[in-house]
Image: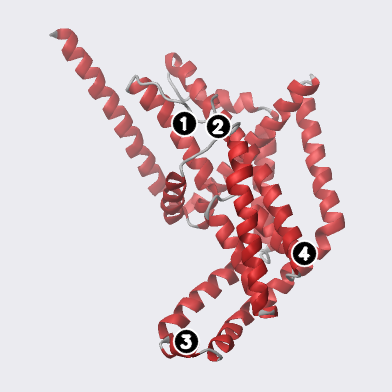
Amino acid sequence: MNEDFLREFRTLKRFFIVFGTASFLVLILTVVSPVIHVLVMLYAGVLFAVFLTGLARAAEKKFNFPYRVALGLVLVSLILISLLYGWFMGNQVIKEFSEIQSKVPRAGESVRELLKQRGWGKSLLSISNETSKLWSLGSGLVGDLTGFFSETVGIAVSLAFVLVTGIYLSINPWLYMDGVLKLFPINHRPEVNDVLNSVGLALRKWLIGRVVIMAGVGLLTTLGYLFAGIPGPLALGLLAGFLSFVPFLGPIIAVVPAALVALIESPFLLIPVAIIFVVVHSVEGYLVTPLIQQRTVSLSPVVLLTSQVIIGTVLGIPGIIIATPLTITVIVIIQRTYIEDFLGDSVKVLGET
């Protein structure tokens, strides 16, 4: 009888611990909402540190270098690649982004002129009070998207914060890990350390896989637009590559500026834009991603879309950007602490083979 009571008491205690932790996180999220942008950038810095650490450890294992020497080589390599790209492509990319930004607002008039030439288009324009509102909303979103690249000062500050934070974290990750572990009771620190290592492993695999996908999407999109004669192929390909960091929603957002620019030049250019979009993301979705996910991390599309909507609602556009890695973090913590430790069940933890 006493054993049953103690077992039920421990179960109830664990439940309240989990419930209390979740409530505490919600409370913290409410309190820190004024500085949520800084916290999002901090999390982005942690992701960059995880990425650098993964590359450094791979170089350390491959070439038998000390960790910090391997990290230095990784940083020098990334800097050289960035400088070379900027030297050969930078001016052209900036010029193309400026042209795209100037062309997008004219797309509204082009659409209206095209609609006036069609019977169904005239009917659509006759009820265009709501249509114009939708168009204004869409063009406004695209304007914000292209305008984002012109806010160089804000972008530079945010990017510098993420890069510097990531580099400092990656130089001595053990120091910061020990600092986090100090927040927990001594007898629970080994378990917390295992959970943090599992989170780091899952994020590292997902990030490296995602970078490969981003590079592939950016390259294929650039080549496709270049051969199809779409204006601004470098800028649009770069945009497609970066936005593919966000699964599902990113590629859809990236094709909007390309479609608008193509529409301004010639309505017939919408056909190659659509073909390139379908081909590139079919290759990515059915060939590249499955091969990469065999060695990295895969999530259900329903889970990804739901997390993007929920986190995007709370945090806005930055939340949509970090939704997938944040979801991976939460899922791994739940798998290790709730399913394995609390429920005592076995589960294949994300990132672990």
* Disc on the earlier residue, 2 or 1: 2
Kindly state the secondary structure of the residue where label 4 is placed.
helix
Q: Identify residue for label 3.
A: 120
Q: Which mark is residue 202?
A: 2
Q: Amino acid at mark 2?
A: Ala
The reply, left or right, for residue 141 in relation to residue 343 is right
The Cα atoms of the two marked residues, 3 and 4, are separated by: 33 Å
The Cα atoms of the two marked residues, 3 and 2, are separated by: 51 Å
Q: Amino acid at mark 4?
A: Leu
Q: Residue 70: image x %, image y %?
A: 78, 27
The reply to whether the C-beta atoms of the residues labelled 3 and 1 are less than 8 Å apart is no
Kindly tell me whether residue 147 is visible in this rendering: no
- Residue under the point 80% across and 22% down: 63
Quarter the C terminus occupies: top right
* Disc on the earlier residue, 3 or 4: 3
| Label 4: few (<14), some (14–19) or many (≥20) C-alpha neighbours in 10 Å | some
* Disc on the earlier residue, 4 or 1: 4
| Label 1: few (<14), some (14–19) or many (≥20) C-alpha neighbours in 10 Å | many
Q: Identify residue for label 1.
A: 332
Kindly state the secondary structure of the residue where label 2 is placed.
helix
* Disc on the earlier residue, 3 or 1: 3
The reply to whether the C-beta atoms of the residues labelled 2 and 1 are less than 8 Å apart is yes
Q: Amino acid at mark 3?
A: Trp
